Amino acid sequence: MKTNLLKYMAGICFGLLTVSLAFASDNYKTVKVKAPFPMQPIKIFIYPDKDFPITDYGAQPGGEADNTKAIAAAIEACNQAGGGRVVVPAGTWLTGPIHFKSNVNLCLEENAVLNFTDNPSDYLPAVMTSWEGLECYNYSPLLYAFECENVAITGKGTLQPKMDAWRVWFKRPQPHLEALKELYTKASTNVPVIERQMAIGENHLRPHLIHFNRCKNVLLDGFKIRESPFWTIHLYMCDGGVVRNLDVKAHGHNNDGIDFEMSRNFLVEDCSFDQGDDAVVIKAGRNQDAWRLNTPCENIVIRRCQILKGHTLLGIGSEISGGIRNIYMHDCTAPNSVMRLFFVKTNHRRGGFIENVYMKNVQAGTAQRVLEIDTEVLYQWKNLVPTYEERITRIDGIYMDKVTCESADAIYELKGNAKLPVKNVTIENVKVGEVKEFVKKVNNVENVVEKNVTYDRKGK
């Protein structure tokens, strides 16, 4: 009798579990993405049809009243109700940091402008974030999500931070460099992240505009961005999402367009980037910190995007210590000028790996290099901090196909490391109008396959 009862209860529990799983699956739609590597369908959460206008929680338009608490209250109510849309109506709304919770879609209606304050104290207390590949506690990003599931920013409105204070922080005076040395040393010697408190004194480590950290099922769709204190969109250790129809313009210092770091299973499509730094960047953490986390950045497709300005159309690294693989950019344009169309960069401190990275069907205006691989990029860190441990990056499988460029200083320059040469680089169907300096240079690379690489004329 007791055995039959247990079987009966188990059957009920299994039935409830089945119903629960079926219900959960009904709350998502999937997007299938074609790529030259296996790509799981990407889930997009279907948010409940419930709206939480920020005006219902005391928000006032006009750009003068501080609406931080009102927006936080709307997010809390939305989360507690099981999810939905937190609606920002047309108008200008002043706010400090916005912290997301699960199942919340921040919807910016057309002609809505979220105007973020630039008083650094508004972005305290510090939160867990990262700075150029090193985890730390720093000023809150302007839009921040930590360990959330199903988070979105949608609509036709605009994110527009005030920039006066942050612009002062663009410079890197000695106190800032000393802070970078401190953070680097702590990360290199495995000091716990909670003890890396960087939002103090004159450290001036600027916050990201959007930083989603360890989140699942992300959607960014339709809105505009106008300026950013630091990296513009940073998806850090996130799993699954779609970024589409964005109009991003930020021309300050370190204003990358979108950075994926130790994240996986993402689609970026139909976006416009106009940046003061690299446009689309794939990263995987820095040195010992990333070896500790051991999380590669993988399975990311970027298609039909336009890069109006940027240092690099597709940048890989230089923070790549967790490893990068299965990246595919295709059918994108850079009609004006970029420094490099496709740039793979690392150095002898990084370790990790880079494999199976593809660029196909790209049209560009002018560039310094169409393709460049550089295994010794250190920027300001070269003389600022020591090498705690040398690990050479394994690079195997870089592919470029069907690329046109009106003019370039060089078509490709590949600078591998003699201790671990780059392997298997394929460059085919590349056409450049004018080559101004040299066609190609190759050092420490095994198996470069070149097919139908041409140019019309060569400059002096």
Image (cartoon, grey):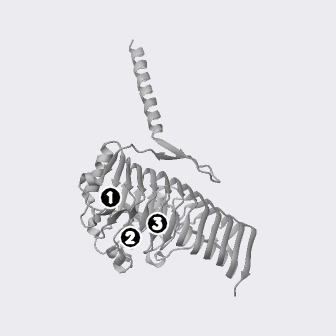
Tag 3, which secondary structure?
strand
Instruction: Please tell me which of labels 3 and 1 falls first in the chain.
Output: 1
**Which residue type does callout 3 highlight?**
Val
Based on the displayed image, in which of its 4 quarters is residue 267 positioned?
Answer: bottom right
Residue highlighted by disc 1: 98
Crowd class of label 1 (few under 14; some 14 to 19; many from 20; radius 10 Å): many
Based on the displayed image, in which of its 4 quarters is residue 197 positioned?
Answer: bottom left
Q: Residue furthest top?
A: 1
Residue highlighted by disc 3: 248
Q: Which of 110 and 96 is in front in this view?
A: 110
Name above or below for residue 59 compared with residue 84: below
Instruction: Please tell me which of labels 2 and 3 falls first in the chain.
Output: 2
Q: Nearer the viewer, residue 444 or 340?
A: 340
Name above or below for residue 117 compared with residue 77: below
Q: Estimate the spatial distance between the alpha carbons at disc 2 and disc 3, rounded to whole Å.
A: 13 Å
**Which residue type does callout 1 highlight?**
Ile
CB-based contact (under 8 Å), mark 3 and mark 1: no
Based on the displayed image, in which of its 4 quarters is residue 158 positioned?
Answer: bottom left
The x and y percentages for residue 395 are: 62, 63
Q: In the displayed structure, does residue 425 sit left or right of residue 289? A: right
Instruction: Name the image quarter holding the N terminus.
Output: top left
The x and y percentages for residue 460 are: 69, 88
Crowd class of label 2 (few under 14; some 14 to 19; many from 20; radius 10 Å): many
Residue highlighted by disc 2: 229
Residue at x-position 38% and y-position 68%: 183
**Which residue type does callout 2 highlight?**
Pro
Residue at x-position 42% and y-position 28%: 16
- Nearer to us of marks 2 and 3 is 3
The x and y percentages for residue 362 are: 64, 66
